[in-house]
Image (cartoon, helix red, strand yellow):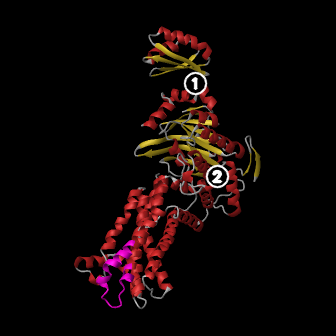
Amino acid sequence: MTAIAGTEKTITTSAPGDVIHASPAGFGRDLTSIAGRALRAVPRDPAAVAPPVFIALFFFVVNIATLKKLTGSHPGFSYTAFEMATAILLGVTGVSRAPALVLDVQTHYLDRLLLTPVRRTAILIGHMTADVAVAAALTIPILVLGIGLGVRFQGGVLGAVLFILLASLWSLAFAGFGYAIALKTGNPAAVNSMFLLFFPFLFLTSSYVPRSQLSGWLDTVAGFNPVTYLLDGLRSLVLGNSWQWGQLGQAVAAIAVVGLISMTMCFAALRGRVKRYSSAR
Amino acid sequence: MRTLSAPPSHTDINTADRTDYAIYADALVRHFNGSRAVDEVDLRIPPGEIYGFLGPNGAGKSTIVRILCTLLAPTGGSARVAGYDVAGQPGQVRLRIGVALQEAALDPKQTGSELLNLQGRLYGLSGQALSTRLAELGELIELDEALDRQIGSSAGGMQRRLDLAAALVHNPQILFLDEPTTGLDPASRARVWSEIRRLNQQLGMTIFLTTQYLEEADELAHRVGIIDRGRIVAEGTPEELKRSVGTDVVVARVAGEAEAARPLLHAVPSVLSVEAHGNELVISTSSGAEVISPAAVALAGSNLTVRDLTLRTPTLDDVFLELTGTHIERNTTQEVSS
């Protein structure tokens, strides 16, 4: 520390290279720093999280009111429990900080991050870590409503935790597409329209009626739709009387397949954007 | 290139010497879609210097800054910053430089304090060292209440100051400032100038400053490089550069094409050079007082009507005009408005 008498004022500060020794912070610290920033931004940007929860709650209530009587005749079947899985997916799919990353590109804040020794992958994984936490939080109001309407989990708290974990991991897997678009295009409109990608996944499956009620081409398509297996896995936690390990395994596999594709795409987009900056030789 | 404070030629410089410079560039080239944005640029900037990089918009200033800061790789040539190769050792370079880019690179939803904390954490600072540093910065850059407010709600001048503070968190050896005062009002501009001087004089920081403002380069820089179309066309201290176009400048504005009067003015004793651009004649001379009357007589002998005749000391714009045939400020205005 050096005390310096300035011409305009007296300041106490360090000369370059004195006292302060900048060094790479390490991957873990980079990750928590970036994730922390992303999480702090969530309450300041309620428009990013409030609509998905509202939509999920709205359709949860409306669908139960519309379809419960049609399906209520099956003994031991709760349409409320059945529909909660669909509501959860509506609530958490497409929720990510990818639009914030686009804003970082547009405001050049990404440049500021890239000028530091931060690991480039930590920028992306930090955002995704925050996304998992946000998705888990977003499931809570839907679960509370479901429990209030009589839904019970296989294995109690453990089943609920597993339910939240599957939903959050699915959210992460799908968010990869948003990050890929964000980093590839830097275009907020493109990122915001990403939810449209989910529409075919959502409707070409057993979202509203059991798969046994699907017929013809729709049943065939549903067989190739990973969301079908994810819904089956989630529903096994609220409809079954025992652990359905096969269905849970298929749900994890469906998330893994979608995640593998989306993560490959978004990390390739990250490499592309960083390469645009730094390796044009 | 007109070099007035001649750096050694690169054939004379061995690796040890290169690392002695704060910034060293050798035949730096950058292509964009086939066009050369940076064209064989050499730089030799010793530690502790404020180097002003002066040129109009689109001259290649920001591209060079982005290369030196490791955000952009050169297409050809090489550069070392703080002794490290920008292409081969970018991590080492990043630890030793601070950068405030042309547009303040900030997250409008963070508070000033959150911005600086995150910045410090990414440079490996923590605990007491980070707190002490943030307190120092708050005092050094006079951030006042901006630390607790969301950045988006701060005025443009304060955002620039926060950007500068973010660039200084890790106490860099070399500070890059890319047009730090563009868009600022005169009071904010004067404040930034004062901070730049303070950083250099009190902390000995090397500062690489790009600007399109003549008075900024003149006021702040120990040496100035004038860049036009990707090439450095002149380099020296502001005084050296201005002296190169004479001790005094006589400017005549005429009705009609000024070129016709050029031969008459060349014949006037003590005239060093005459540049004609549109309806303007710029006469460089070692003695303005001696030249102004004979120049007026010579102009009266032509068929041109003299609108005004001005005697003044040369500016860096006169240097730019002589070297490129155009005014830097006119050039800048045209590019900004296009």
Which percent across, then down, holds residue B189? 60, 39
Q: Chain of mark 1?
A: B
The kind of residue tagged 1 is Val
Residue B293 drawn above or below residue A41: above
Q: Quadrant of the N terminus of chain A?
A: bottom right
- Residue B77 visible in the snapshot: yes
- Report if residue B7 lies within the magenta region: no
**The one of A12 and B318 positioned closer to us in this rendering:** A12
- Residue B172 visible in the snapshot: no
Which span of residues is magenta-colored? A58-83
On screen, residue B328 versus residue A217, left or right, reads right
Circle on res. B236: none
Outermost residue, left side: A216
Residue at label 2? B145
Which percent across, then down, holds residue A281? 47, 51
Q: Residue at x 48, y 76 (%)?
A: A140
On screen, residue B250 versus residue A250, left or right, reads right
**Number of disc labels:** 2
- Report if residue A77 lies within the magenta region: yes
**The one of A214 and A229 positioned closer to us in this rendering:** A214
Q: CA distance from mark 2 to mark 1?
A: 47 Å
Q: Residues within 10 Å of mark 2 (few under 14, many from 20)?
A: few
Q: Chain of mark 2?
A: B
Classify mark 1: helix, strand or loop.
loop
State if disc 1 and disc 2 touch (CB < 8 Å).
no
Disc with the residue nearer the chain's start (2 vs 1): 2
The kind of residue tagged 2 is Glu
Residue at label 1? B245
Classify mark 2: helix, strand or loop.
helix
Q: Residues within 10 Å of mark 1 (few under 14, many from 20)?
A: many
Which percent across, then down, holds residue B35? 42, 42
